[in-house]
């Protein structure tokens, strides 16, 4: 049975998509079979995995029941890594679903048909706390929150945590905050260190030990339709995501997310 993980933060530009595709790729390198769901209308996860965004079989068609999940799944160039691409039409799904019965469970119900085919399913959430994100959290076992190592990093974090608690209370009582992932860390910048220290002091063991550095190769790789692990395996960004995958797997072995 697949473990379903939402990668979410309502603040944009914090590394949600980068984390989704590169952690997924690192886990595949460790022997797992993984599905990435691009649930952001911008479709950056689809681009970053080199998959063409189609108009008929995608995450929008899936949640509006215009296609089945098996039709929506696309293979990537990486063996054992599949993706459900996004489309700009996904931005209209929240309006379309507003009057639909059990609208918060559309994604959860769809995923029930393929949970046995993967070890992990990652949902790359949009930068908002609307119905799409609620669908993702309702369908998930765990949530990873990427957090940029900058001054405004913790702004809005309490709102996200309130949303998580609301989803747990009303829709998905087993939802678990797996951890906050500090991204775009610059060890030459004292501010990065201060933010990291503050976040760890506040959230303690809910912060991943792995720090994702600010790295130009990580920024370049999506333009080539590749995760950074394929674009430059030896760069600091690739090494950080491999370390994150090891930490991720150790959490399950230790029973930390049960």
Image: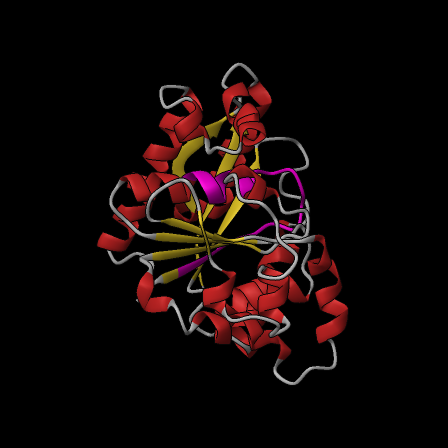
Which residue ends up furthest to the top in the rendered image? 188
Residue 213 drawn in magenta? no
Considering depth in this image, is 199 or 87 the residue closer to the camera? 87
The picture places residue 224, in percent across and down from the top left corner, at 54, 28
Reply above or below: 194 against 123: above
The magenta segment is 4-22
Which residue ends up furthest to the bottom in the rendered image? 101
Residue 112: which quarter of the image?
bottom left
Which residue shows up at 24% across the image and 45% down it? 31
Which residue shows up at 39% across the image and 34% down it? 241
Reply above or below: 217 against 137: above
Point out the image quarter for the N terminus: bottom left
The picture places residue 80, in percent across and down from the top left corner, at 33, 48
Which residue shows up at 77% across the image and 70% down it? 95
Point out the image quarter for the C terminus: bottom left
Total labels drawn: 0
The picture places residue 151, in percent across and down from the top left corner, at 66, 32
Answer whether residue 16 is visible to the viewer in this image.
no
Reply above or below: 51 against 215: below
- Relative placement, left or right, of 121 versus 91 is left
Coloration of the structure image: secondary structure
- Relative placement, left or right, of 163 versus 33 is right
Considering depth in this image, is 237 or 164 the residue closer to the camera? 237
Which residue shows up at 39% across the image and 68% down it? 114
Answer whether residue 130 is visible to the viewer in this image.
yes
Reply above or below: 40 against 194: below
The picture places residue 65, in percent across and down from the top left corner, at 60, 74
Residue 16 drawn in magenta? yes
């Amino acid at each position: 049975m697949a473990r379903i993980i939402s990668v979410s933060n309502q603040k944009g530009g914090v590394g949600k998509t980068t984390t989704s595709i590169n952690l997924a790729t690192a886990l595949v390198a460790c022997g797992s079979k993984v599905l990435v769901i691009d649930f952001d209308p911008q479709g950056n996860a689809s681009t970053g995995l080199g998959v063409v965004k189609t108009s008929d079989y995608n995450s929008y068609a899936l949640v509006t029941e215009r296609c089945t999940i098996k039709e929506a799944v696309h293979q990537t160039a990486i063996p054992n890594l599949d993706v459900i691409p996004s489309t700009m039409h996904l931005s209209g799904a929240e309006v379309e679903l507003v009057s639909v019965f059990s609208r918060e469970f559309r994604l959860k119900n769809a995923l029930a048909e393929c949970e046995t085919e993967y070890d992990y399913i990652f949902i790359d959430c949009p930068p908002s706390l609307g119905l799409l994100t609620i669908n993702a959290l309702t369908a998930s076992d765990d949530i990873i929150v990427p957090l940029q190592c900058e001054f405004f990093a913790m702004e809005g974090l309490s709102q996200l945590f309130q949303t998580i608690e609301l989803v747990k209370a009303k829709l998905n009582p087993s939802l678990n905050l797996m951890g906050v992932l500090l991204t775009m860390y610059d060890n030459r910048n004292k501010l990065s260190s201060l933010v990291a220290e503050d976040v760890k002091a506040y959230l303690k063991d809910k912060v991943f030990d792995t720090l994702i550095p600010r790295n130009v190769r990580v920024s370049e790789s999506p333009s080539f339709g590749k995760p950074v692990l394929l674009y430059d395996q030896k760069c600091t960004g690739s090494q950080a995501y491999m370390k994150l995958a090891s930490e991720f797997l150790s959490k399950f072995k230790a029973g930390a997310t049960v």
